[in-house]
């Protein structure tokens, strides 16, 4: 029984959830003796009012778009891929390898190579849990979580023992060759008179993320494969009836998911750090879950949610910089947003449903 | 509602209304049931029968209206209160603990004190008494899961009687029974009535209403359209009251003219995931232009037979279609491969197999055929073309509302089935397999669905029909095969057999035994 109109489901509920999260966060800020309105203004100013702020917001958003899409596509096959973190870590290794060991003539070709490598490495890391789920029935949530830890340990080992330049103390690879450095927004949009995005890490990968949104949308709603993935996700028994192979669908959906999660490492590794460092993923794989949840597993929703979380990340950093609000509290605010938009969905949905039902009865 | 009757009605509902969100499940319903009678409630799916009985049993609270039991206004906030007022309910799906004994199940929830033994001893004595009084014989020490379905149902009735029920509500009690088990059930109900108990029988089977009830209420779309004395009505009239228009109850068809064999099955065996042999080597032939019906109580291998032929599970043996052998295991044996050789399959479980309930009707209109060149170009799917086709298809099969953008779940059972039938029939298959064509389908749609099946037969197609409704098999099929415990017990010409003979075969009694 569907009682909510579509627009209310995709627009109203997230907005109300967001508002509630904002209110509760304001109370928390108030409780530690800061002015919530001033804090909010600071967040907006620091992340949306200056081009450099935007440069950070979009940089974070790029990561979240990729990981959000990864969670979304897996979720269409009713697979809960919470291994985006590990898939991105391993993909970072792939990006580093092709950047360090292949002499690229130009960044654009290097970007293509890095995309292939990141996709392949991410997909590879998703393949093992996918295979285990398909063939042995090992639960994908458990295996992908464990693979996050394995990936982190693997990266640690590779950085310390293999990629670290001799003599360096830092567990990181050497810098990538200049030819692989991606153009930043600063380089792309600044003119001599008006410097834009100064010092911000946003780079050309953002457009790759936008392209990924379009491609994922096409895949899910315009292709046979997307139709099969969605069918399988909705009903495994019906998929079996239609001759859709469950094992194959699980593996393919997870490969695509892993590849998408992997692509975020281009942004952090090739775009920002320009070398492989230990903590480049920084929880973006997990934020992707909240992004997909809030974006209703639709690429456009994922884009919007990723922008929101980019804003929260950058605004949070500004808060930590300029106020006495501790860094931990900013994580609390982010967590409140996740909780309200994701976990507490029904808290908003149910009263709204009865409200709409009442209005409808009033009309007839 | 004879005024001269001095006894107050056992059940009287006055102006009961209940809404679920925007859906009005019960609208101002009033009935009165005389004590010591069998009162039938008949209506299509979603007419509000179960809601009404759930209100009476305390599962739902009515928005408006009053319940009177034996002449006193009674408040029934929960099932405990219902039991206390002497109401017992036998659900369609039994509420028994499978690995408990009969006695334990009967005592469960009605124990006296903290110790179990005295309760069990008391129950044993009571049970013997009940068994004698109503001929309800069940071994009190048998483990429930080892009992036949008919006996499990008796345990449910005994449970109610043990709790001093004077009023017994039975929800679709014969859905899972063989014909002879159903006969026994009605003998028991008859006996209970003669002992003064009041029985409310919810069913969609007109025959049961006509044969066993004293009065009958008809429900349609949440309203009580009529309450009549059964002796003063007839099935056609009841059907008309249920649907709101005249309905043809008999299937109108000419004798079959079977042609060459289309489907040939030899020594087919099916072993399920738990290693249990479900189909134990059966032979079956379906010819062009005939409808072969497989009768049997649910769970005797019919489902597995259809699933193997439809590519949903592996099997062993030989299956030929148009003389060409089909693989029964491996990658060439899936649903897609079966569709490629022109086998269409309307599976038994519409909700879990035939349709994706959250997909719109147009997306469901090509489900399983989504690789067809008509609807794809390269890896892409031509949504607009499918939408257009679905729209026309829904028009041809009279699907209501004819809106292909609506989700499958928002259609009624009958209209969902029409979507599935349209999809499968319009592929112009050589063999159409249909499992439970009218399960959960309203009477009005049954008529249409039967006509479509017969029309396909008349085009010279082979049709394999599986149904647990004997009436449906007898009226639709040209030839009937009866399955019991994974075997085909016998084949009969549909015109030359009857429910009694098939009923014996369904219970595993072959002609030689019966003679």
Image: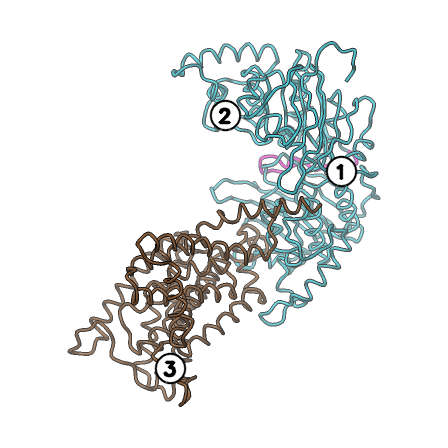
Chain colours: A brown, B cyan
Q: Where residue A69 sits: x, y (%)?
A: 46, 65
- Return the residue at label 1: B493
- The disc, 1 or 2, on the residue closer to the chain's N-terminal end is 2
Closer to the camera in the image, B441 or B503:
B441
Give the CA separation, mark 1 to mark 3: 79 Å
Principal SS element in the magenta part? strand
Q: Quick one: quadrant of the N terminus of chain B?
A: top right
From the viewer's perspective, is residue B52 above or below residue A79? above
Circle 3 residues within 10 Å: few <14, some 14–19, many ≥20 = many
Picture residue at 83% right of the left edge, 23% below the top:
B232
- Between marks 1 and 3 in the image, the one whose residue lies nearer the viewer: 3
Give the CA separation, mark 1 to mark 2: 37 Å
Quarter of the figure with residue B482: top right
Mark 3 element type? loop
Q: Chain of mark 1?
A: B
Residue stretch in magenta: B482-496
- Between marks 1 and 2 in the image, the one whose residue lies nearer the viewer: 2
Pointers 3 and 2 within a single chain: no
Q: Chain of mark 2?
A: B
Closer to the camera in the image, B384 or B348:
B384
Image side of residue A206 versus residue B224, left or right = left
Q: Where residue B168 sits: x, y (%)?
A: 62, 20
- Between marks 3 and 2 in the image, the one whose residue lies nearer the viewer: 3
Circle 2 residues within 10 Å: few <14, some 14–19, many ≥20 = many
- Return the residue at label 2: B144
Quarter of the figure with residue A61: bottom left
Q: Where residue A298 sits: x, y (%)?
A: 52, 62
């Amino acid at each position: 029984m569907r009682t909510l109109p579509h627009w209310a489901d995709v627009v109203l509920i997230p907005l109300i959830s967001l508002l509630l999260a904002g209110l509760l966060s304001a109370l928390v800020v108030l409780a530690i003796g800061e002015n919530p309105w001033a804090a909010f203004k600071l967040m907006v100013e620091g992340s949306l009012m200056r081009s450099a702020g935007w440069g950070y917001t979009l940089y974070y958003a790029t990561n979240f778009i990729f990981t959000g899409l990864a969670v979304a596509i897996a979720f269409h096959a009713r697979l809960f891929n919470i291994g985006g973190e590990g898939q991105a870590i391993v993909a970072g290794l792939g990006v580093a390898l092709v950047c360090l060991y292949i002499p690229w003539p130009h960044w654009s070709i290097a970007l293509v190579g890095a995309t292939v490598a990141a996709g392949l490495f991410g997909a590879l890391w998703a393949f093992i849990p996918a295979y285990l789920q398909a063939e042995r029935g090992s639960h994908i949530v458990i295996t992908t979580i464990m693979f996050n830890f394995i990936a982190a340990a693997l990266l640690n080992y590779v950085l310390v023992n293999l990629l670290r330049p001799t003599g360096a103390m830092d567990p990181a690879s050497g810098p990538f060759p200049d030819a692989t450095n991606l153009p930043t927004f600063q380089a792309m949009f600044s003119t001599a008179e008006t410097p834009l995005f100064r010092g911000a890490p946003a780079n050309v990968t953002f457009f790759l993320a936008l392209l990924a949104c379009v491609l994922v949308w096409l895949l899910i709603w315009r292709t046979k494969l997307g139709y099969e993935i969605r069918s399988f996700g909705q009903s495994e028994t019906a998929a079996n009836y239609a001759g859709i192979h469950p094992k194959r669908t699980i593996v393919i959906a997870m490969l695509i998911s892993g590849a998408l999660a992997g692509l975020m490492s281009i942004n952090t590794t090739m775009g920002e750090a320009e070398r492989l460092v230990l903590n480049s993923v920084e929880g973006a794989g997990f934020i992707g879950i909240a992004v997909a949840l809030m974006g209703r597993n639709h690429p456009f929703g994922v884009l919007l949610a990723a922008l929101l979380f980019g804003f929260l990340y950058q605004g949070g950093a500004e808060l930590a910089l300029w106020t006495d609000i501790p860094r931990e509290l900013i994580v609390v605010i982010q967590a409140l947003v996740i909780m309200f938009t994701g976990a507490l969905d029904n808290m908003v949905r149910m009263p709204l449903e009865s409200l709409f039902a009442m209005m409808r009865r009033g009309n007839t | 509602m004879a005024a001269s009757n001095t006894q107050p009605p056992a059940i009287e509902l006055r102006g009961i209304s209940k809404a679920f969100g925007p859906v009005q499940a019960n609208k101002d319903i009033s009935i009165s049931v005389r004590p010591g009678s069998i009162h039938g409630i008949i209506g299509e799916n979603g007419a509000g029968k179960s809601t009404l009985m759930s209100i009476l049993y305390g599962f739902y609270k009515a928005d408006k209206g009053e319940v009177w039991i034996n002449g006193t206004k009674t408040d029934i906030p929960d099932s405990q209160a219902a039991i206390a007022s002497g109401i017992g309910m036998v659900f369609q799906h039994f509420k028994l603990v499978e690995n408990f004994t009969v006695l334990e199940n009967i005592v469960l929830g009605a124990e006296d004190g903290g110790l179990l033994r005295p309760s069990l001893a008391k129950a044993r004595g009571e049970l013997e008494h009940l068994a004698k009084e109503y001929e309800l014989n069940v071994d009190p020490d048998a483990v429930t899961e080892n009992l036949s379905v008919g006996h499990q149902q008796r345990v449910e009735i005994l449970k109610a009687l043990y709790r001093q029920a004077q009023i017994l509500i039975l929800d679709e009690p014969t859905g899972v029974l063989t014909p002879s088990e159903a006969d026994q059930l009605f003998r028991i109900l008859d006996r209970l009535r003669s002992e003064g108990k009041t029985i409310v029988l919810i069913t969609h089977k007109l025959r049961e209403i006509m044969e066993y009830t004293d009065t009958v209420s008809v429900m349609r779309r949440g309203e009580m359209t009529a309450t009549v004395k059964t002796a003063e009505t007839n099935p056609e009239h009841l059907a008309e009251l249920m649907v709101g228009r005249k309905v043809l109850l008999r299937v109108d068809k000419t004798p079959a003219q079977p042609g060459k064999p289309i489907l040939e099955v030899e020594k087919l065996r099916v072993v399920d995931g738990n290693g249990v042999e479900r189909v134990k080597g059966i032979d079956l032939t379906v010819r062009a232009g005939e409808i072969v019906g497989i009768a049997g109580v649910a769970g005797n291998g019919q489902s597995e037979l259809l699933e193997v032929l439809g590519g949903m599970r592996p099997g062993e043996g030989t299956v030929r279609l148009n003389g060409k052998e089909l693989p029964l295991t491996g990658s060439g044996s899936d649903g897609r491969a079966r569709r490629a050789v022109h086998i269409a399959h309307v599976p038994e479980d519409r909700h879990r197999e035939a349709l994706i309930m959250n997909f719109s009707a147009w997306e469901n209109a090509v489900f399983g055929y989504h690789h067809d060149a008509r609807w794809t170009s390269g890896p892409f799917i031509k949504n607009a073309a499918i939408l257009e086709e679905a729209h026309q298809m829904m028009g041809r099969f009279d699907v209501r509302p004819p809106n292909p953008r609506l989700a499958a779940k928002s259609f009624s059972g009958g209209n969902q089935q029409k979507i599935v039938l349209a999809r499968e029939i319009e592929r112009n298959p050589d063999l159409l397999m249909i499992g439970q064509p009218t399960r959960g389908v309203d009477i009005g749609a049954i008529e249409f669905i039967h006509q479509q099946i017969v029309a396909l037969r008349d085009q010279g197609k082979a049709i394999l029909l599986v149904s647990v409704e004997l009436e449906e098999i007898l009226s639709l099929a040209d030839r009937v095969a009866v399955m019991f415990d994974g075997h085909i017990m016998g084949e009969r010409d549909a015109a030359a057999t009857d429910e009694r003979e098939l009923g014996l075969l369904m219970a595993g009694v072959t002609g030689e035994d019966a003679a």
